[in-house]
Amino acid sequence: MNHTPTGFLLFLLLSLAMSAASLAHEPDEEEIKSGYPYASLSEEVIDMGVMAAGSNGDGYINLSNLGKPDLLIARVRSSCGLMIPTWPETAINQGDTVRIRFRYNTSRLGKFERKITIHTNAWQKNLIVTVKGEVIPEDQF
């Protein structure tokens, strides 16, 4: 068998072109949703508005699974100890929606803006929700 440098170069270039073509293929949204859990938030920014000091600081984030495999929430954390999140520990089936609850401590006066990070097994991995609002003295409400 005769191996020439030209034949080898041609083989190498053809292999690189095929590799580049397969790497360049970006899955469309439907491909992603069919192969992975796909998390969808009802809102990325939640404005709690103006609240009186000492009032109920509860809020909710709606999270849906638009993918086929089950969506799992590994943990939810907030950027500040004044906001405490709680979440369901069960798998979220395709098409289902769950509520992640958070409670802001309304004893601190003033405007606030906090981030809540939701760690999942979804295609997007981590989802970030911004929660903002303002707490004023009860007598000014």
Image: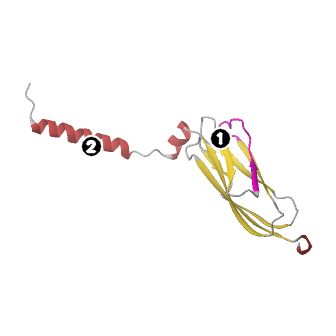
Q: Of the residues under marks 1 and 2, which one precedes in the sequence? A: 2
Identify the secondary structure beneath mark 2.
helix
Q: Is residue 80 above or below residue 8?
A: below
Q: Secondary structure of the magenta portion, mostly?
A: loop
**Left or right position of 123 against 93:** left
Give neighbour class at mark 1: few <14, some 14-19, many 20+ (Cα, 10 Å). Answer: few
Q: Residue at x 31, y 40 (%)?
A: 19
Q: Is residue 137 above or below residue 10?
A: below
Which scheme is used to colour this image of the protein? secondary structure
Q: Is residue 100 above or below residue 112?
A: above
The C terminus lies in quadrant: bottom right
Identify the secondary structure beneath mark 1.
strand
Q: Is residue 75 magenta?
A: no
**Left or right position of 27 against 135:** left
Q: Nearer the viewer, residue 28 or 119?
A: 119
- Residue 126 % position (x, y): 59, 49
**Left or right position of 38 against 46:** left
- Residue 69 % position (x, y): 60, 34
Magenta-drawn segment: 83-96
Of all residues, the one furthest to the right in this rendering is 139
Of all residues, the one furthest to the front in this rendering is 81
Give, as a three-letter code, the residue at label 2: Ala
Give, as a three-letter code, the residue at label 1: Ala
Looking at the rendering, which quadrant does residue 33 occupy? top right
Task: Tell me, yes or no, whether the two marked residues, 1 and 2, touch with CB atoms within 8 Å.
Answer: no
Q: Residue at x 13, y 36 (%)?
A: 7
Q: Which residue is mark 2?
A: 17
Q: Count the labels in the image.
A: 2
- Residue 25 % position (x, y): 39, 44
Q: Which mark is residue 74?
A: 1
